[in-house]
Amino acid sequence: MSHNTFGHLFRVTTFGESHGPLIGGVVDGCPPGIALSLATIQGFMDRRRPGQSRHTTQRKEPDEVRLVSGVLETEAGLITTGTPITIIIDNVDQRSKDYSKIADRYRPGHADFTYDAKYGLRDYRGGGRSSARETAVRVAAGAIARAVIPGVMVRGALVEMGGDHAAERNWDEVANNDFFCPDAAAAHRWADKLDAARKHGSSLGAVVEIEARGAPAGWGAPLYAKLDQDIASALMSINAVKGVEIGAGFQSARLTGEENADEMRMGPDGEPTFLTNNAGGILGGISTGAPIVARFAVKPTSSILTPRRSVTRTGEEVDVSTTGRHDPCVGIRAVPVGEAMVACVLADHFLRDRAQIGSDR
Amino acid sequence: MSHNTFGHLFRVTTFGESHGPLIGGVVDGCPPGIALSLATIQGFMDRRRPGQSRHTTQRKEPDEVRLVSGVLETEAGLITTGTPITIIIDNVDQRSKDYSKIADRYRPGHADFTYDAKYGLRDYRGGGRSSARETAVRVAAGAIARAVIPGVMVRGALVEMGGDHAAERNWDEVANNDFFCPDAAAAHRWADKLDAARKHGSSLGAVVEIEARGAPAGWGAPLYAKLDQDIASALMSINAVKGVEIGAGFQSARLTGEENADEMRMGPDGEPTFLTNNAGGILGGISTGAPIVARFAVKPTSSILTPRRSVTRTGEEVDVSTTGRHDPCVGIRAVPVGEAMVACVLADHFLRDRAQIGSDR
Amino acid sequence: MSHNTFGHLFRVTTFGESHGPLIGGVVDGCPPGIALSLATIQGFMDRRRPGQSRHTTQRKEPDEVRLVSGVLETEAGLITTGTPITIIIDNVDQRSKDYSKIADRYRPGHADFTYDAKYGLRDYRGGGRSSARETAVRVAAGAIARAVIPGVMVRGALVEMGGDHAAERNWDEVANNDFFCPDAAAAHRWADKLDAARKHGSSLGAVVEIEARGAPAGWGAPLYAKLDQDIASALMSINAVKGVEIGAGFQSARLTGEENADEMRMGPDGEPTFLTNNAGGILGGISTGAPIVARFAVKPTSSILTPRRSVTRTGEEVDVSTTGRHDPCVGIRAVPVGEAMVACVLADHFLRDRAQIGSDR
Amino acid sequence: MSHNTFGHLFRVTTFGESHGPLIGGVVDGCPPGIALSLATIQGFMDRRRPGQSRHTTQRKEPDEVRLVSGVLETEAGLITTGTPITIIIDNVDQRSKDYSKIADRYRPGHADFTYDAKYGLRDYRGGGRSSARETAVRVAAGAIARAVIPGVMVRGALVEMGGDHAAERNWDEVANNDFFCPDAAAAHRWADKLDAARKHGSSLGAVVEIEARGAPAGWGAPLYAKLDQDIASALMSINAVKGVEIGAGFQSARLTGEENADEMRMGPDGEPTFLTNNAGGILGGISTGAPIVARFAVKPTSSILTPRRSVTRTGEEVDVSTTGRHDPCVGIRAVPVGEAMVACVLADHFLRDRAQIGSDR
């Protein structure tokens, strides 16, 4: 079966498909009385919105969010009521175009073959539920999640594209380029790199880093509700993601025990503090109070002009090249999606922790 | 709260702590009439059992599995009844030793600080629920999972230790050395490497690779019940794991679209086949029929003799060095645990797929 | 938190509020390739639709169902794709009327006080999520559930109103009167009774009976996934329901062991058969193959013209009488809702059973 | 599948079977630092324990509870650690007797036939998971739940046996007789009644009432996490229960709107108060602050000496009479079980409410 819901107490269910009239979601479990701003939500949407630069798909979607339940307009502004919040985003530019060419052929790297293998049929229009368009709803849900944990700042950056690493983490730089890149020099290189790939009918992969600051020590649990486990699940649920790591991640496997274990001292505020953060802010599944750091790998866009060998539903061998509007590097727009997913996981764990421990920390 | 359960239809709940009289688990949702062999289960237990070589902890635990419910001894042998199977493993060598030295100091890299931060108290004897001893139950559950999907072979290997890669995937070699290493030459190097680390009061990290062959195309779902998402969650739930990747994983971020997308042709059996497997057997969250390949990074053991700076519960700055019986590379014994977790995820998805699609594939 | 989802494998999430632009739901886990008919779904909607007779509220809602995802129009008609089906029902007649009179006073029998007690605020327009309007979505979901288990017929009847019992179970009669009453004489009496109640500014309670025929023996589970437990939960989740019973129900507490235990003999088809059905088709939480029979008690409508003593948010003592469009007996329109809930529970258990046992029974 | 878990945040998983070496359970999500008393837990166990009077089964089970994880012995006594609490109860008197007589014949009223229908096989020794012995674990879990919500008093009584009602609710009387009966005169009558039934090889049904005082207004949710829905589910999950009602229950269907809706006035403490409690303390799925009142119907014991017609696995028609140790009225020992289930539901909703609202109320 499809489970279209994630989260336990801050629960998000998404619905709709790329080619239908709308997509949307339900955010369940949100506390009452939380102030929301449609403008703020829309700001997050705009970061993911297609067509913001020549480096993303030219599909034109305003991605205007409507909240059709669970909120109340008061004199002090929009607040949550505690009942489920319904997000509706109309599809405007879904182009009921000619899908006959791909209806019966499997695009390499896409879910076409596996969809057919699973369901025995496939709604080939726009990728069905596999379309990255669904991630718009996640961004809206993430914006609500942020309002639930206002003391936590979640931010993301593209830290690698096509194997080329950002050398810096200059967070002020992230908004200054088309790539959410925290390194101006890298962003400059990537623009050329991505133009070249697009012109060659190719595409590039990328690595996204998400950082959450302000989460207190104590969120998560020792087993099966580990904070890192839930972050891994949430990030791996994003389209095209093939790897997830926390803190030093795979690099930690190359450290010695004395290099890896973050030492502690008393901080200037009289609280214990960590001298390094290889743990990425999580030990034993529970947050340490240090910044939570996660990274995920996004494979290169599978929709490329360069022909690839494939087969059809009926077993004919064919070459497939994908025309149309596509992101040459889906990793770029995955940045706000990754932020949203981490925000949702943290809001969920805030509520779960509050349930068991009883404080707002 | 702690959620001590994972899986949806093949559901595993574990219980117990390292220092208590027993640990155990409940496997819920197992089909009836499945033949089980205690000897086979015990065989998997023995692979994870401590004290098998000088390279693992010298704690002596027979790890004898008792199944105290959900099974019936018949003339044809032990079979499942369809009701929950309870696994009990007695703790034999728990050494009610002197914990006073660590009771109030936080061991770097361990969950001591975060436990206290979360719960306000901590059962310091043996790490509580954070002890890797809990993973014994996972191995037993995984052995049952394997019996549910007998057509699927799940196997694992240590493919990197201390930054040194196994050059081969010689699966026949895995049982021939103390490291589950698929490369005899690497195993030889690692023995020296690990001896050296242990003698220096240090420890090493590792990377484990799990491969599942025989799973049909069609398991998983497009969203939030993605097979890769559930594998990532399951593997990240293992102690000391800091990263998970599927197929080409982080490396896929460095490929171009045409390199990464696995091409298809018709196989000799008249079925579509993939010419490469960068996808690691999963596309759009659904299995492709190709081998499912996942890797996870295990940080070096945090319990080391080399002193590390830390603090106590009351804010005193101290140096902590950990004596006692510890694995110098916890990645080794994580191999059978990783296999077990993937087996459980696959058994779960087999049942979930059968629910929705109605066939046994 | 609100959990706006029910079911495990056939999962229904509802959203929206009475006064908003729309209500809707997501049906997750539906098998692919199931033939749906919008006309058939609409037929079920019409049975619940308000304004069908003088005995129900005069609110005019067409309750037209749109399926905006999870279905595909094929030459053979509309079929499910296996991905989540989204139901949208526009609110047409929500009358953004003057709620100021009730905004700060608690209507007795309503959730006004408890909403405020829980959330500290209340969306007083139309009852928020407590509005019975939400049940329209359940009926649509139930229509889809029926298509998943076409061999099972689920039907309901009003068997008691205002303490007056239907003497017969003439199912052919149910469609012939305004009450879904299986006894023509009772229906005649009830018409007068309900007219009298309405004229006196009063309202009546009722008992609804649901019967499901065709479910095989074997659905359900011994513990915590008992079929009767899930039916009880589903029926108790309907607005205004205060009691649920299975088979002989509360009457079984007045029988002796030998009267109550349904005896068995071999049926004419060579299959075991029950000579009576006090169990209501469920033993030990598992279906017996006999008709599944459940009843639920619906309290009289709380919105009545007769003034009742109450208090305001600020502690002022007031008398409240509720004008506006209301059902004088909410039990009537609860009949199709009860059917829908039982259909959803059975579809869920069909899938759960198929997961574990592997057959389509 | 079997789901052997109930509850969301205060989650209970039970395991084991009547004839095995032990039964037990895991209580997950319990807050840390809760003081527990083994003596208090044992006190609740003793109320359910068999063999306390001639009116219950003579099976001798000490039902001694061991807590093997999740607790810590401190100077101040036993406290919870916040990790899962494991309950173990050894089976002492399981009599590995001769089951050959019932191995292939279906006892009317029991789950024998449905077990076979579901699983294709059946562990006939002691009823497997259908044995009421499992309810011992619920009582232990309920005792822990009570400690989580110490301000709430949950108590139960047998209010009807064999159709004979208790006229009073004299709670002080409940401990004075063998029936948990709140009416001394009724208890006297019931003793004779039950002796007569037992002598005639018959059995009696009963109705149990559970009352919870001290729960604040605000627990529960408008939809699908309704407090009454979860109570209904929990009580219907008890063996032999065929009906559940809240407050006036089925009787509310016979009241008019003005009789049924509980009026409100300001209480002497300046808080809103209800003048009646037909709602049984729950409106719109949320607690009102008034006592929560639920009742459930327990069918007469199916294990009776009087022969009943039945069939065997192979289709032979037989008469079955059940010898051995059985309760002539299982409703009696269902009283502490019902209390325990309501306590667990309330502890769960306390945590769920605290998660969303953030206060301890």
Image (cartoon, coloured by chain):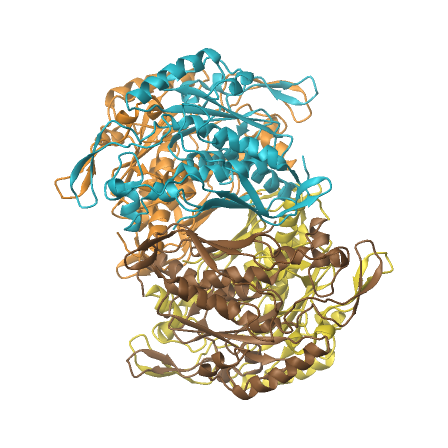
Chain colours: A brown, B yellow, C cyan, D orange
Q: Is residue D84 visible?
A: yes
- D298 over B149 or under it: above or below: above
- D8 over B176 or under it: above or below: above
The percent position of residue C113, horizontal first and vertical second, equals 27, 42
The percent position of residue C30, horizontal first and vertical second, equals 61, 44
- Quadrant housing residue C94: top left
Lateral position of residue B228 relative to residue C54, left or right? right
Q: Specify the quadrant that holds the C terminus of chain A.
A: bottom left
- Quadrant housing residue A354: bottom left
The residue positioned farthest toward the top in the image shown: C185
The percent position of residue A350, horizontal first and vertical second, equals 38, 62
Q: Residue at x 60, y 33 (%)?
A: C40
Q: Is residue D63 visible?
A: no
The percent position of residue D289, horizontal first and vertical second, equals 25, 41
Q: Nearer the viewer, residue C23 or D312?
A: C23
Q: Nearer the viewer, residue D233 or A74?
A: A74
- A293 over C136 or under it: above or below: below
Lateral position of residue D316 relative to residue B1, left or right? right
The residue positioned farthest toward the bottom in the image shown: A185
Q: Nearer the viewer, residue C210 or B52?
A: C210
